[in-house]
Amino acid sequence: MFRNEQKGRRYSMKDATLCYIESDGKYLMLLRNRKQNDPNEGKWIGVGGKREAGETPEECARREIREETGLKAVRLVPCGNVYFRSDVWEEEIMRLFLVTEFEGELTDCDEGELHWIEKDRIFDLKLWDGDRIFLKYLINGVHFDEMTLTYRGERLCGCTVDGEEVELIDVYNEDGSSAGYVASRDFVHWKGLWHVTNHMWIVRKGESGEPELLLQLRAAGKRLYPSSWDISSAGHIPAGEDALLGAVREIGEELGIRVRPDELAYIGTMVMTYDDDIGEGYHDREHCRIYLLRSPVDISAMTLQESEVERVMWIGLDELTEAMAEGTLNHCLFEEEIDFLRPYL
């Protein structure tokens, strides 16, 4: 029995283990394709199963490993608890383990095919969306206490790790078509997956008639490009959110101004790529939707999101172009995007 903190009551939940066996830079993965009425049919997962009465999680893990692989786990490392919630299947707590030492010879499994898969290739397999999140933790040697994965059907629609919400975004192919799954934002940038973002430029005519653009100064605490001048407002689109409505939301959150969808003029999509060595690496592959906002904006009336934006300023197009060329402005803008904007200003 487990406690549902939100409802303040106790309820039953399936209690199981999920184990990944490591050897020579590979994980032992099970392609589930031999069991009838299997919710994991066609997916690649670790080995494990439901706890029996009186078993500890460790005892269950060792038994399941022996039954499904023929191997004896010598060193079994607990890596966290994963709470699985679904609108279709029974709720479940999965005790996650990593096996780094084992004995014995691999045998056949009656639930599917066992294969040793290089860690770099695991994410090319057909996985549950949530599995990508905790497998990233395992591969990078990062443990957690509790992860909650919430599904609608086979689509991941929510994730928290140790009480913190994880941002989920839709994954796309290079040609702009949907890849058919969602992933965490940090996973997308870790693997360099294609995704869609919004860039919203606020523009006005200056006193001389020259176009002026509103720039925001990114907060000093930002991981990427702290204290750098950036687009008026920009952001990733949460999984399942309409791009235009996401643009409206982002402007409201970052700048504190209310904008109607019909006030944003979509002018096109740019393909942007960028790579940087930040921590575990940062790889950006974007289909960037670009919008213009020409409505009068009073920057003195803005309520800036402190965690994102320090301040804003207007700058003439020619002045901005010159400053970027001469390196006199600390910024994270792309010249290609300014050139893309120019005909519409």
Image: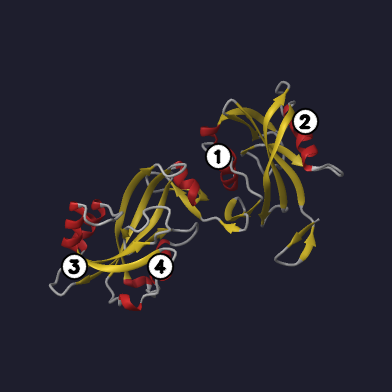
- Numbered disc 3: secondary structure: strand
Q: For the residue carrying disc 1, how many other residues have a C-alpha within 10 Å: few (<14), some (14-19), or many (20+)? A: few
- Whole-Å distance between the Cαs marked 4 and 2? 54 Å
Height in image: 14 above or below 314?
above
Q: How is the image coloured?
A: secondary structure
Quarter of the rendering occupied by the N terminus: bottom right
* Residue denoted by label 1: 140
The first of marks 4 and 3 along the sequence is 3
The first of marks 2 and 1 along the sequence is 2
- Whole-Å distance between the Cαs marked 2 and 1? 28 Å
Q: For the residue carrying disc 3, how many other residues have a C-alpha within 10 Å: few (<14), some (14-19), or many (20+)? A: some
The image's mark for residue 67 is: 2
Q: Amino acid at mark 3?
A: Pro
Q: Amino acid at mark 2?
A: Glu
Q: For the residue carrying disc 2, how many other residues have a C-alpha within 10 Å: few (<14), some (14-19), or many (20+)? A: some
The first of marks 2 and 3 along the sequence is 2
* Residue denoted by label 3: 211
The first of marks 1 and 3 along the sequence is 1
- Residue 160 or residue 219, whichever sits in front: 219
Q: For the residue carrying disc 4, how many other residues have a C-alpha within 10 Å: few (<14), some (14-19), or many (20+)? A: many
Quarter of the rendering occupied by the C terminus: bottom left
Q: Are marks 2 and 3 in contact (CB under 8 Å)?
A: no
